[in-house]
Amino acid sequence: KGDYDDGNASFKIHGSRWEAHAVVVVDETVGNGDSSASIKCTRVMLHDLDMYYASNLVKKIAKQNEIADELSLRDRCDFIRQRTIRNESTVATPILHRSRLFPSLSQESPALLFDIFRMDECECAVHFSVYNVTHRAELDCKWVNTLVNLATLHDKGDGNDQENSSNNNDTVAADQKSSSVTKVFITVADCNLDYMTPTQFNVASRSILRCGDIRLTSNIVRPSGPAQSFKLSVGDVSLLLGNKRHQYNMENSKLPRAATILPLHALDLSTAPADLHHMNLVTILTLDSCVVSVNTAAQNLYSEETKDPKTILQITCGQLSLSGCKDSFHCFTETLGELSLKLTALTEQHIEEMKEMDKGIISLPKRQPRSCVDAEEFFDTETGNLEEEMPSQPVNLSVSTIVPLDEGHFAITTQPKKRELKSSGPKERRESFELDGYDWTAVDHEWSREELPSGEEQVARWYGSDSGSLLPVHDQEHGGALSSNNTTKQAQALKIIPHHIELKCHQSILDGGDMDAAKHAGLPSPPGVNARVLLRDLRIRCRFFDGYDWPQYAPKRPKKPRRPHAFVIDYTLDKEQQSKDQQTETSKKSAATSKHPAAASKKQSLMNNLLEVPGESTASPSAFQNIPLPEERSIQIADRAERRRLFRRSNRFLQMSIKGLQARIDTFPESDEHSLANCVHVDVKEFFLAETISDANPTKILGEWFSELEHPRDTKIGLITLKMVTWHPSRRISDDGSIVNDEAIAGLRILPLRCFIDQRAIRFARAYFTGDEEKQEKQWAINLIEPPPPIFRDFKVLSCKLKVNYTPEKLDINALRDGSIVELINLSPLNEMVIMLQKVSMEQKVGFGEVVGELLSFWIKDICATQLHKFVTNSSPFKPISSVSEGVVDMVVLPWEALRNGDKMSKALSKGVSSFAGSLAYQALDVTSWLTNFASDRLSKMTTSGSKSNSHRQVPRGVSDTTGYALNTLTKGFETANYKVIIVPYRQYQQTGPGSAIKSVVRGIPVAVLAPLSAASDALSYTLLGARNSVRPDIRKEEEANRRALMWDL
């Protein structure tokens, strides 16, 4: 502006040690004695690279052409040099530069390396490598659009346009006739993506994304084929996070040509951290490996009739790890939240564009989205379209009837049934006997009712016969089939109940199929898929540590008396007490100053005179200023000790682990025939929560409940399954100008879960995920409109069983007096309490937050209304009594039921007695083992500095497996007693004499007595545990499954 060009932009690329190489091969085999030369290999490399984007860099010289002849050669060179030097209006930003924060592992490796290998006339390979380069990312960057416009510049109004177009057409035609293959290899190693939050954002942070290795490969074929494939592999990725907007001044000062392009304030080192250590960056996120395969169909060959996705994105990931303390985790989530809001939010301009699009939309007939009325069918939907036309003539056949036995499990009973088969709609098919709309249980073949012709091979088939004939009856007691002429028993249908089976054979969600897109779209055939995303076998590990990653910025709180297994962030819960303590501390300081105001002012004036330099009116730095006073030194020592106490405690954490996460997302293009947006299927194979807050050893809070007797699990079924279907609204903008929500249906299935909950772990979770400060309003986002979440027309959650063990820490009497009835569960521990979470159906809920809140509210009300008695019967004082009482009830009820049904009394009585004896023996062994283990733990605390560790103990299968551990434990106990009573006094005798030896013997007598007792209690507890597991092997298998889940990730 003014003397400068309006809106001009400049790019400057500065490099050092440019090198170019070429290999020329001379071919002398050409006819007529001529020879031809061709370049087989070309290499261009650049050791250092820096790229800047600057605005208002070039001065506007008036009448430049008129004075050009008067300028000398030196003046012309100076004029060209001045075009790349900043002025008062220049705004420059580095885009790409060699990394300055992270030293290069290979100093001689070039920053850019470009190779071209030409194998023959039709095949060549291109290698492009980038090493140790940093890119500074900005949200409101303009250099991308400028660079694109610069690359697409062309002369308008040129008279040679027609000639150029004809030449281009000839070139394209020649290219179509010739064929070539270009192999592209792109490698990015040790590169960084640097991002600092804008000043208008509420959260101040700086993030550096480090990529250890990125490789992109592809084969470019000309003329283009039916599809194009790319493969991207990523390894060793980490995200570093800081809680301040650390300026780039230190890095700018080391960039070449920065002094002539960047402004002076960007080179000031007084406000910038010296190095990476002073920035206090924390590694918050890591990813060990990821492989991405992209297949895209050619635009001219793609059509929706092919039913193949236009783009298929397959992602295979390794382990994604998230680790951080409370302050770093909240900084990460807030930074990510503001960034996503900035990128996804809509402006008024976007709203106007959507309104214009709505004007041209023809209203489609209203289609009600398919509701997941039958939740089991919604989950068990095949990925393929397997429906077949059914015959319309009536036939006499043998069919299989599904008998419900348990939630999600059924048995097959085959019996003859005459049924008229006819085509039916989806609703009629759901109400019929067929499984999930499929008729694999129906037997409609002729050979099922007739004898096999002689000479044909044997064929597996259902038992069946014509009407009026008798079927063979299976004798379950004798294991054989009775003759149909047996008159002692009436002929009945053959019952086959071998074991619990699932409704259908589950297939992987990644095996293909259309995910019932035709039904959801309301079309006779599935619509074309725009893009398909497949995520395979992702592992996630999140660790939430106690303490702070930046303790110098943590809110200061008064110290509290230490409790066993206390955690640092526990102080955030008592906010009222914090405010009272701060007010008390402030009042003490003000009172100390108000008592002796004259002395304080005199002391301050004397200190100012002492530090003042003679001959100058203002105070300047002196040698005394760097020497702290004794009071200041003590404050500094206490401050450093407090920082060490508040720092991250790596042995206290809460962990969430996910293994085998698979997902499939099918997105559909907008069409006039349907409004289907996408279909989502997420499956989690393994999931658990663990903590080390209540105990030094990892404890599993939540995970799979393994039980082969009560609920055997199919390995193909995920522990957590979520299916979701979304439809676009007919109009995006309503009449009042607001954005219309998408409509969706969803279903959630959770397999039985096992819980070991400790009150201290719950307190830690509350303290960790609860913010210390109130959320500030985002002033910068006032004019932005966030897209609304979908409206769930129907959200179904299947029933789920929980087996809970709860360990309370203390009972809050004040909260109980205030009416908090929930505190009653802290009266006593709960052991093996089985809770049934009922099936829930929610309608017209907006977003997942409202769904989760409504779900938890429903389950809590249902438990309080129907299962509240379990909190009493499963508490520690009443659990043995209630378990033994169940055995007594079986001993009485089973014979009575046998007498009523005419069964054998001896068999029923033996079952009742065995049930009573088994429950009595199990409870006796379990309670005794717990008591001896408790005694051993208390005694070990008296003899050693800490409690004993049971992490190394294996789950014993029986008493025989406990002998080795018991002998080792007893040996260690006697060794401890021997060390305290004999070895230590003997050393004292050699050093100081008999007096100290006698004192040492006296001090070691309690240990000599308690250590063997503790070892004997531990050995007895382990032996009783083995005896209990021999009585109840199902409990042993459950404990082994819990331990396996902890071992593969802890």
Image (tube, grey):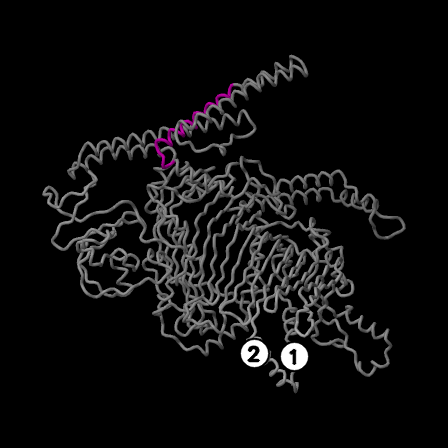
Res. 813 visible in picture: no
Q: Nearer the viewer, residue 694 or 99?
A: 99
Residue at image location 45% in from the left, 61% down from the top: 665
Dot 1: few (<14), some (14–19), or many (≥20) neighbours within 10 Å?
few
State the residue position of label 1.
154
User: Residue 341: percent from the left, percent from the top?
Assistant: 55, 62
Residue at image location 66% in from the left, 62% down from the top: 115
Q: Relative to 679, is 152 on the left or the right?
A: right
Q: Nearer the viewer, residue 678 or 731?
A: 678
Q: Relative to 215, is 719 on the left or the right?
A: left
Residue at image location 19% in from the left, 31% down from the top: 906
On-image quarter of the N terminus: bottom right
Circle 2 — which element?
Answer: helix
Start-end of magenta stretch = 1009-1035
Tell me the quarter of the picture where residue 632 sits. top right
Looking at the rendered structure, the kind of residue marked 1 is His
Tell me the quarter of the picture where residue 46 sits. bottom right
Lower sequence index among marks 2 and 1: 1
Looking at the rendered structure, the kind of residue marked 2 is Ala
Res. 900 visible in picture: yes
Magenta stretch, main secondary structure, is helix
Distance (Cα) linking label 2 and label 1: 22 Å
- Which label was assigned to residue 173? 2
Q: Nearer the viewer, residue 381 or 141?
A: 381
Q: How many marks?
A: 2
Circle 1 — which element?
Answer: loop
